[in-house]
């Protein structure tokens, strides 16, 4: 509770001293740290506080296991973002410091709220602050309004959901929504918009690439965590097979679609944006499987897939924050938008940004022993256990989900390797603008280290979260270091032992490499001349094979010198846009065409109608 | 005149070459991959050199192959002394070649003498050079192995 008060105090002080950006971000960091401590404190013993307003409705604030977990994960990312912003924020105005502090404060209330009113107010404040912080970049109105439109759509659905609960029970508390299917359905739809699930993901591609990188990191991680948190709450309140199956289907489709689009993408920030869609899809599908297993009395499977969801959240949050921070660093230094233009980040920009992209990318590509590998292995393990369900329909659905998710993991790995290979490891130097980067590097290195450590010591996290019963010792691995996916044993994995073996083999490889010094590396031979921009093997060349094979889905068009492809889920919105433009032009031509006698006719008509209405009432 | 087929069989139209070969000549034992750079030569030398590709010389039978990149070449043939602009390209080509390699310089007219500092020069031909002479040298290098 002390940490809660201190966090609010620090955030308020951060907002108050917004004119001094550095101080403001430092207060933000301290506040975020307090929230992390609050999360660790209240994971085992949460607090709860309620007030009655005129004995009409109750408002409440408090934490439990679930919200504490989300507080820890989201605010570790927030503290990294705050540290990163100390130097990165110098490129933007003072308002951003104020807005980031306010976002952190409102997110704290979102995760701690126990009633609809506190939740919705905090939710709206966070949305509006994010809208204004996207506008910090010039010429980003279009993208910011797109974000706002989808956020408000989500808010409206949530308001409808809470209104349904209020009309049924007269209470605004979340608990009142128990066993209310209509509430659960509307809130579910509202939260999946927040999670960027297909087909509500169309805004992300443009908005993420336009927003400043620290804001993009907030959009990608803590904001989508709000959606995930909401889905967790709803599925624990309302035990509905329909919603669980809907979650599995939408989640797997979203994962597949996100991975499919990231395979063709060549923009620097759009690719991680689609990767966000993919990860959130996986989280949703895994949660759905967990709930379905719980309803079907499969306790161990339910526990394991619940744990999978938590690990997917950890993996997504840490890796995606690292990736956005590193990409933002490179993008601001080089001033370029596409992956092809920022080659050689590791050599030219900085080691920490290069390693940040490398490690987070490898984590997304499921390279052991990083945390992304652990979570994706756990997801596939839980999906492989579909045979345990007695219902044939569930078996079928989960098997097909497994197929889609496996495809998604492969495609995503294909896409992310493009990002790593061309941006971080490529070789090409361009003009570098020097920016102060001490705090930027600090944040990047810390997050990269977290990605590695949380992967290797995943069994420690498992014990802390209270799933010690899923750990064992087998095959020469000592007792708690082996994760078991089922009882009796179905599949086992030990990232810790993997890391030990990996380090040993790495030493052997390095020794072999250093003992053989007769290796020469040269650039490609282009008649002895230096390579030009257009002579390098580019990202389009890498992904063209996918674009060509799947030309039906991507609508690939081969122009004379370049290739075009398209996310067809945009076509729904393109159609709506065209329809409304046409509708408005038709209305303006027919009714509001500027002729005076039309207006006189309206006035007379309304006068007559009003006369009739009042006369006969 | 009726005996022309017999005449044709008995008379060699092409010359017979004599090579200075090492102990046991075996034309198909080794092969030499050659990369050619025109570093500023005149057309005469160019025509002479590229006539080596004609069937008359049949270089493939002797294990001599012309390749498109220095990365897979054993021998770099530099036609004429490199001009100052071509010198860095020649040096880059030498840098790209795998070890062991050789460099063969061919000039058909005299230039100002300046030091090129090129490594591993195995042959330096000067004067009015004909295709046959280059062919002989190439086969000598191919048969004898590169001695650098």
Image: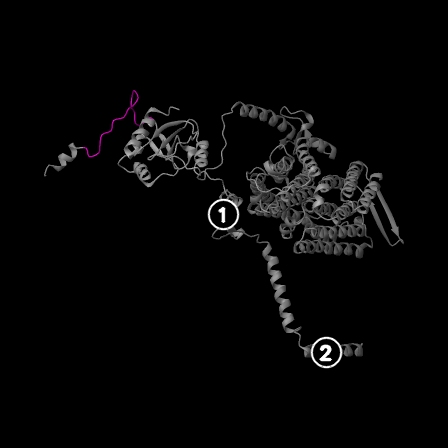
Q: Position of residue A88 (x, y in %)?
A: 70, 43
Residue density around tag 2, few if under 14, some if 14–19, many if 20 or more, within 10 Å: few
Residue density around tag 1, few if under 14, some if 14–19, many if 20 or more, within 10 Å: few
Q: Position of residue A181 (x, y in %)?
A: 73, 52
Query: What chain letter is assigned to the residue under label 2?
Result: A
Q: Residue B20 lies in magenta, yes or no?
A: yes
From which residue to which does the magenta span run? B12-29
Q: Is residue A552 visible?
A: yes
Q: Quadrant of residue B111?
A: top left
Q: Is residue A581 above or below residue A174?
A: below
* Residue under pointer 1: A549
Quadrant of the snapshot with the C terminus of chain A = bottom right
Q: Residue B18 lies in magenta, yes or no?
A: yes
Q: Which mark is residue A605?
A: 2
Quadrant of the snapshot with the N terminus of chain A = top right
Q: Secondary structure at mark 1?
A: helix
Marks 2 and 1, how far apart in space? 61 Å
In depth, the one of A280 and A303 nearer the eye is: A280
Q: Secondary structure at mark 2?
A: helix
Residues beneath discs 2 and 1 located on the same chain: yes
Q: Position of residue A158 (x, y in %)?
A: 74, 54
Dominant SS type (magenta): loop
Instruction: Indicate which disc, 2 or 1, sits on the residue closer to the N terminus.
Output: 1
């Amino acid at each position: 509770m002390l940490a809660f008060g201190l966090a609010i105090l620090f955030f308020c002080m951060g907002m108050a001293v917004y004119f001094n950006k550095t101080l403001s971000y430092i207060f933000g960091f301290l506040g975020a740290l307090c929230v992390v401590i609050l999360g660790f404190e209240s994971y085992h013993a949460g607090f709860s506080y309620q007030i009655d307003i005129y004995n009409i409705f109750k408002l409440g604030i408090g934490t439990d296991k679930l919200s504490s977990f989300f507080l820890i994960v989201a605010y570790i990312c927030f503290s990294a973002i705050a540290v990163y912003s100390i130097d990165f924020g110098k490129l933007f105005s003072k308002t951003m410091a104020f807005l980031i502090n306010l976002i952190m404060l409102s997110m704290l209330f979102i995760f701690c709220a126990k009633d609809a009113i506190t939740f919705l107010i905090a939710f709206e404040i966070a949305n509006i602050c994010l809208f204004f912080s996207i506008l910090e970049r010039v010429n980003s109105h279009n993208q910011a309004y797109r974000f706002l439109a989808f956020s408000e759509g989500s808010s409206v659905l949530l308001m409808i959901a809470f209104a349904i609960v209020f009309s049924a029970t007269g209470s605004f508390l979340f608990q009142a929504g128990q066993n209310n299917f209509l509430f659960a359905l509307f809130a579910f739809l509202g939260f999946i918009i927040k999670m960027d699930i297909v087909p509500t993901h169309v805004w992300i591609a443009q908005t993420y690439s336009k927003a400043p990188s620290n804001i993009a990191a907030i959009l990608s991680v803590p904001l989508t965590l709000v959606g995930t948190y909401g889905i967790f709450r709803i599925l624990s309140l309302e035990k509905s097979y329909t919603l669980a199956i809907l979650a599995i289907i939408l989640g797997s489709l979203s994962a597949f679609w996100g991975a499919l689009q990231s395979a063709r993408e060549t923009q620097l920030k759009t690719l991680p944006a689609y990767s966000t869609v993919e990860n959130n899809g996986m989280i949703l599908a895994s949660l759905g499987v967990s709930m379905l297993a719980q309803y079907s009395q499969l306790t161990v499977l339910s526990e394991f897939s619940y744990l999978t969801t938590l690990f997917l959240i950890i993996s997504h949050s840490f890796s995606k924050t690292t990736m956005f921070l590193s990409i933002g660093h490179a993008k601001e230094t080089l001033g370029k938008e596409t992956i092809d233009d920022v080659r050689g980040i590791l050599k030219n920009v900085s080691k920490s940004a290069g390693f940040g992209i490398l490690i987070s990318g490898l984590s997304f590509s499921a390279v052991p022993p990083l945390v992304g590998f652990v979570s994706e292995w756990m997801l596939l393990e839980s999906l492989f256990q579909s045979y345990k369900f007695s219902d044939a329909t569930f078996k079928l659905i989960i098997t097909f989900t497994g197929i889609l998710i496996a495809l998604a993991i492969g495609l995503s790995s294909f896409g992310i390797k493009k990002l790593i290979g061309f941006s971080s490891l490529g070789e090409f130097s361009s003009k570098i603008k020097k920016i102060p980067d001490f705090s930027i590097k600090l944040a990047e290195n810390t997050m990269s280290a977290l990605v590695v450590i949380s992967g290797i010591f995943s069994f420690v996290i498992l014990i802390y979260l209270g799933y010690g019963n899923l750990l064992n010792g087998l095959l020469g691995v000592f007792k708690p270091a082996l994760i078991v996916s089922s009882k009796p044993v179905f599949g086992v994995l030990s990232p810790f032992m993997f890391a030990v073996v990996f380090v040993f083999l790495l030493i052997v490889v390095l020794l072999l490499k250093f003992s053989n010094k007769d290796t020469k590396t040269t650039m490609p031979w282009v008649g002895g001349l230096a390579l030009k921009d257009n002579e390098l093997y580019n990202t389009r060349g890498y992904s063209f094979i996918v674009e060509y094979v799947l030309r039906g889905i991507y609508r690939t068009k081969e122009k004379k010198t370049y290739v075009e492809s398209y996310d067809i889920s945009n076509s729904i919105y393109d159609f709506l846009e065209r329809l409304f433009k046409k509708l408005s032009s038709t209305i303006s031509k027919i009714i509001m065409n500027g002729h005076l006698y039309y207006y006189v006719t309206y006035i007379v008509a309304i006068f007559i109608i009003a006369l009739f209405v009042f006369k006969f009432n | 005149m009726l005996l022309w087929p017999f005449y044709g069989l008995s008379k060699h139209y092409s010359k017979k070459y004599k090579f200075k070969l090492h102990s046991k000549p075996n034309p198909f034992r080794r092969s030499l991959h050659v990369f050619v750079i025109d570093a500023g030569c005149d057309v005469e030398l160019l025509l002479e050199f590229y006539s080596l590709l004609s069937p008359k010389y049949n270089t493939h039978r002797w294990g001599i192959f012309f390749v498109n990149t220095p990365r897979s070449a054993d021998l770099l043939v530099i036609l004429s002394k490199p001009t100052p602009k071509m010198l860095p390209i020649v040096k880059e080509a030498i840098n790209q070649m795998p070890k062991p390699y050789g460099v063969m310089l061919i000039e058909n007219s005299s230039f100002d003498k300046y030091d090129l500092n090129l490594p591993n020069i195995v042959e330096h031909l000067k004067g009015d050079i004909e295709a046959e002479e280059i062919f002989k040298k190439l086969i000598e290098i191919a048969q004898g192995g590169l001695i650098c």
